[in-house]
């Protein structure tokens, strides 16, 4: 029997029937040995490993506890026990196991890497980054540790460092589409659109069947003004995952930019049929209907967006414009006030430069001056 195996956390999902049968037979052999020799450490350890390998994690955890009661100084056993506990979603205890493994063997990379991912999974991102960096000291050529470090840094909004980490991961191994996709998405967030496009092209060459990659690819192309190419990428995305509202939503936005208003409305309608509780999609629908001069329906769409996310000056401002187009100046004035109160810097200046709203603004100023006069009269009355 071998006592130093390290559990492959994905192995239980990909064992052949022959392997599974062989492992189950070996478990029975271990059970016979243990029945005869109850304190046989290697038999308990190997039995624990086999149970974990066939996905019987509860039994494996119990077996590892017995193994460690016999001998608690083997770092690989502590690490394997931690892996099993993570499978059972007992994350805090798993972290303690990795710490025990590192106490026995401070340079044991697998335990340091697992501890890092455990911290990451528990949203302790700062500690996870430090732990990933310790893992990098032990094995600087392992691309995944750089990748996950980048992901943790993104959670801390340290995007520049995350980009460096993801670039390093891609440099060490350029065949993982997830690395290129995350790098491309992060570069998009940092408005580095040309670099983002290059990264996403890499991701597509590796895996052309990932709808998310195509959507980010489209976003990069859209930012670069390449709208027809962006639309083509989104056609790929909706073909691969027609049930994802995000892709139909983004497709609708690109069609709006292409001034294909009817098609944009159809695309946004599809997005909202899939996911109605999306204030941004309702906002885009309002904008599409407004551009189509369907002002009443545009107002309704903006209302639905505001019902989900109430404080949107853009929605109130465009409702004001729609009401103005319909000749309903009182409603236009009310919605313009709301927009200007939510974001006075942008929407006050925009309103004064908008010919459609200038007469309404004059009405608002007249109303305000009346209120000031009334207030002055009240003060004068109170002073007598």
Image (spheres, helix red, strand yellow):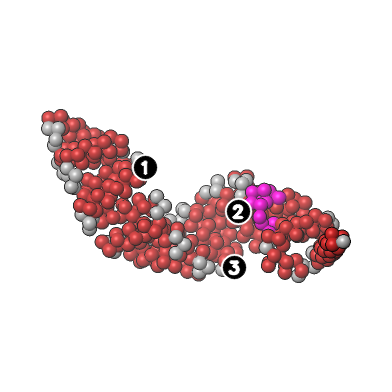
Contact between marks 3 and 2 (CB within 8 A): the answer is no
Q: Where are the magenta residues, as a range?
A: 303-315
Q: Quadrant of residue 177?
A: bottom left
Q: Position of residue 238 (x, y in %)?
A: 55, 51
Residue 335 seen by the camera = yes
> According to the image, label 3 marks what residue?
225
Taking the spot 72% from the left edge, 58% from the top edge, the residue there is 338
Q: Position of residue 49 (x, y in %)?
A: 23, 41
> According to the image, label 1 marks what residue?
89
Q: Tag 3, which secondary structure? A: loop
Label 2: how many Cα within 10 Å (few below 14, some 14–19, many 20+): many
- Disc tally is 3
Vertical placement of residue 71 versus 226, above or below: above
Residue 17 seen by the camera = no
**Is residue 308 covered in magenta?**
yes
> According to the image, label 2 marks what residue?
249
Vertical placement of residue 226 versus 331, above or below: below
Please name whichever residue, 133 or 179, is drawn nearer the observer in this view of the structure. Answer: 133
Which circle marks residue 250 in the picture? none
């Amino acid at each position: 029997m071998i006592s130093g195996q390290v559990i492959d956390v994905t192995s239980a999902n990909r064992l052949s029937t022959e392997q599974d049968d062989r492992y189950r037979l070996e478990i029975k052999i271990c059970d016979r040995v243990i029945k005869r020799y109850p304190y046989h450490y290697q038999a308990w350890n190997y039995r624990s490993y086999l149970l974990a390998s066939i996905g019987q994690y509860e039994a494996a955890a119990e077996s590892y506890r017995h193994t460690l009661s016999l001998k608690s100084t083997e770092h690989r056993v502590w690490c394997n026990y931690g892996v099993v506990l993570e499978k059972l979603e007992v994350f805090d205890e798993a972290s303690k196991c990795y710490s025990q493994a590192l106490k026995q063997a401070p340079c044991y990379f697998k335990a340091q890497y697992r501890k890092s991912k455990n911290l990451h999974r528990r949203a302790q991102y700062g500690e996870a980054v430090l732990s990933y960096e310790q893992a990098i000291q032990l094995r600087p050529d392992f691309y995944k540790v750089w990748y996950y470090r980048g992901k943790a840094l993104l959670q801390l909004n340290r995007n520049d460092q995350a980009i460096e980490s993801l670039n390093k991961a891609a440099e060490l191994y350029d065949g993982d589409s997830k690395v290129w996709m995350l790098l491309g998405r992060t570069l998009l967030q940092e408005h580095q659109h040309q670099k983002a496009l290059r990264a996403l092209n890499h991701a597509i060459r590796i895996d052309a069947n990932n709808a998310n990659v195509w959507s980010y690819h489209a976003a990069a192309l859209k930012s670069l003004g390449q709208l027809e190419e962006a639309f083509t990428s989104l056609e790929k995305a909706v073909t691969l995952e027609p049930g994802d509202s995000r892709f139909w939503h983004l497709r609708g936005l690109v069609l709006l930019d292409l001034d294909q208003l009817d098609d944009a409305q159809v695309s946004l309608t599809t997005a909202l049929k899939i996911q109605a509780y999306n204030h941004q999609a309702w906002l885009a629908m309002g904008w599409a209907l407004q551009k189509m001069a369907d002002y009443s329906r545009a107002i309704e769409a903006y209302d639905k967006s505001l019902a989900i996310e109430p404080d949107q000056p853009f929605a109130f401002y465009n409702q004001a414009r729609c009401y103005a187009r319909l000749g309903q100046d009182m409603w236009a004035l009310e919605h313009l006030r709301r927009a200007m109160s939510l974001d006075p810097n942008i929407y006050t200046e925009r309103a004064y430069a908008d010919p459609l709203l200038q007469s309404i603004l004059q009405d608002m100023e007249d109303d305000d001056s009346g209120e000031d006069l009334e207030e002055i009269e009240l003060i004068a009355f109170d002073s007598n």
